[in-house]
Amino acid sequence: MNQKFHFVARIVLGLVFLIFGLNGFFNFFPMPPMPERAAAFGMALMQSGYFLPMLKSVEVLSGALLILGLYAPLGIVMLFPIVINIFLFHFFLAPEGLPMAIGILAVELYLIYSYREAFKGILEAKSDR
């Protein structure tokens, strides 16, 4: 059961980011109307010219890594700041999406826990001396 849940969680999170990352390039899902401050934030990211293409590229790459099971811990690490930002965006600017954001955060945290052995090395205090 645990193996199945792990597999499903990895695939679901990978699909979410692969599909919505590709949507950033091909716009096959229309954007719903957003509250004023959330829309202003989104416009600022668009006007930077570079940020959204970079963000969506990271989402597509990370999603693909999770779906394929190749370097899944790397994909999880790459997605972590994005997932935190999705949660905070909905918490502060667009609360109607908060349940979805909490679900994505929960799956991300579960996968971090699942792959905890892969992260041991980066969580050890080391000195360059």
Image (cartoon, rainbow, N blue to C red):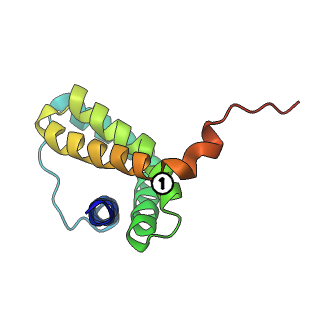
Examine the rendered structure and indicate whether residue 35 appears above or below residue 112.
Answer: above
Q: Nearer the viewer, residue 92 or 4?
A: 4
Question: Which residue corresponds to the image point at 53% horizontal and 64% vertical from the top-left?
Answer: 71
Question: Which residue corresponds to the image point at 11% horizontal and 44% vertical from the top-left?
Answer: 33
Question: Which residue corresponds to the image point at 29% horizontal and 68% vertical from the top-left?
Answer: 26
Q: Residue 1, how many percent across, how many down? A: 25, 63
Residue at the farthest bottom position = 68
Whether residue 7 sits left or right of residue 73 in the image: it is left
Q: Residue 37, how many percent across, how many down? A: 22, 28
Residue 14 figure quarter: bottom left
Examine the rendered structure and indicate whether residue 59 appears above or below residue 40.
Answer: below
Q: Nearer the viewer, residue 91 or 126?
A: 126
Q: How many marks?
A: 1
Examine the rendered structure and indicate whether residue 50 appears above or below residue 88.
Answer: below
Q: Amino acid type of disc 1?
A: Met
Mark 1 crowd level (few <14, some 14–19, many ≥20, 10 Å Cα): few
Provide the residue designation for mark 1.
54
Would residue 49 be visible to someone looking at this image?
Answer: no
Whether residue 69 sits left or right of residue 7 in the image: it is right
